[in-house]
Amino acid sequence: MSNVPEELAYSAEHEWVSGEPDAGAEVTVGITEHAAQALGDIVYVEAPRVGDTVVAGEVCGELESTKAVSELYSPVSGTVIAVNEALEGAPETLNSDAYGDGWIFKVEISETATDLLDAEAYAALTE
Amino acid sequence: MSDATLRSPLHDQHVALGATLVPFAGWEMPVRYTGDIAEHTAVRTAAGLFDLSHMGEISIRGDQAAAFLDHALVGRISAVALWGAKYTMLCTPEGGVIDDLIVYRRDWDHFFIVANAANKDVVVEELTARLAGFDATLEDISPEVALIAVQGPRAEDIVARMCTRGDDDIRAMRYYSAANVLLQGDIHAFVARTGYTGEDGFELFVDADEAAAVWALALEEGAADGIVPCGLSSRDTLRLEAGMPLYGQELTRDTTPFDAGLGRIVVFGTPAKPRGDFVGREALLRAKVEGPSRVLVGLLGDGRRAARAGYGVLDAEGATVGVVTSGAPSPTLGRPIAMAYVPATLAEPGTVVGIDVRGRREDMTVTALPFYSRAS
């Protein structure tokens, strides 16, 4: 069973959001442990760039493992204000610390997100 | 999981090891235990332990067993020596590949065929149809047989230590040959020096009800050598680096052995060493004379984004001229590798082709297969 921290919000596409996803707020985005486990060893992360506009539910990058490739969806709408540069040299951090050092990007939210799941709902989705 | 899903006799061992199990060819099999790259690397540097009990095993016996297989398969099976093994194919009359197989000779009138899990039933059906008129019998022994592979540079020492009788045979055994040995616990095993990883290694065929004991023995005797249980994901990247084709990807009913660069396994015979008729002979001879319209090549990338099965191969103008059959980031090389069918005009090593990686072109260079060969 994978870990689903209580304090985070989740998308059905297996991203997590840290922070209140209200308009004007800054949040951090990553992929869940469940997603990282399903992909296997991640060897490449193509994240959006700082300044990019991302839209909730739309593709904003990709994740490549030895086994498969998966699109990265943005769970929120807004402007990318930071990207985790450390993933370039150490993409395996997504497997080892999906909710911590494996964060992928930060967004300044343009529109309050209303369709994110709480931990319980996300856990139910992945059962 | 549907009721029809088959489970390996080692299912409980996989669950206890925390494996991620996935549906595969009608079976529920481990895709990985810990991590794909660690498992892949263990096979390249030490040893990996694989449960391949999903593979099909078919026994052929009788006075005309060899003559039957000469008729049914593209290779000259009658020429295989006792305890020898041969990589061969079952083809349609039109020359398309139904399955690729390894045939082992266990006695002058007894052969043992290993088929892909997904094709086992069709192989049994097709071989049975081709048996007519031959004094030979076919038996599908897949349910009673477990297949456990020990692969990697430490495999010989580990498998030799697992034996109470026959460890000398293990050490003396050449690649693509086999022997009967006795394993610790009084377990009889048919052991072949074959594999699908590009490393030295052994495949142990044992009774399904002794699989758990053999699995535990391999882990115990291999512990000091760093043996690691390995899943299907690492098996796929290992075989891809070794340039070995996978049925359903490089090989299909729409490909001939010549398309796949494996024409050498089709034996037509010579005046001095004639061979009788075999299923597909006429079509395959035509394929040989005409030459393939497309060629299976290796592709090596410089970027990070890997080509995957099904992606289009693009020429300089961006037209789709071929298709990727397998692709992954190579754990050993640290670069994307792939196999693809391309027109003969683009098959020369050094040729740069484009790959349509989800709408964005990535260049890859045609390269000779395999991508990886072990130091011999």
Image (spheres, coloured by chain):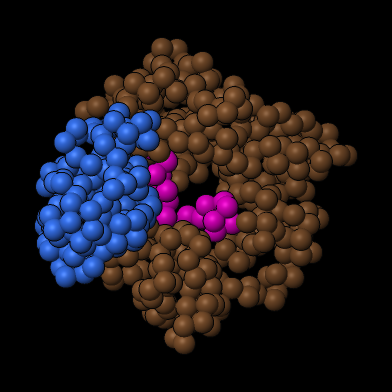
Q: Quadrant of residue B164?
A: top left
Q: Position of residue B287 (x, y in %)?
A: 70, 69
Colour in which chain A is shown?
blue
Q: Nearer the viewer, residue B318 or A30?
A: A30
Instruction: Reply yes or no: does residue B246 show up in magenta.
Output: yes
The boundaries of the magenta stretch are B230-251
Q: Where is residue B72 in the image (x, y as percent from the top left)?
A: 75, 47
* Residue drawn at the location 12% of the way across and 55% of the way down: A26
**Image height of B93 relative to B51, above or below:** below
**Image height of B355 relative to B207, above or below:** below
* Residue drawn at the location 54% of the way across and 77% of the way down: B321
Colour in which chain B is shown?
brown
* Residue drawn at the location 36% of the way across and 31% of the way down: A124
Determine whether, in the image, residue A53 is placed left or right of residue B116.
left
**Image height of B58 relative to A9, above or below:** above
Examine the rendering and report whether any part of residue A46 can be seen. Answer: no
Examine the rendering and report whether any part of residue B285 can be seen. Answer: yes
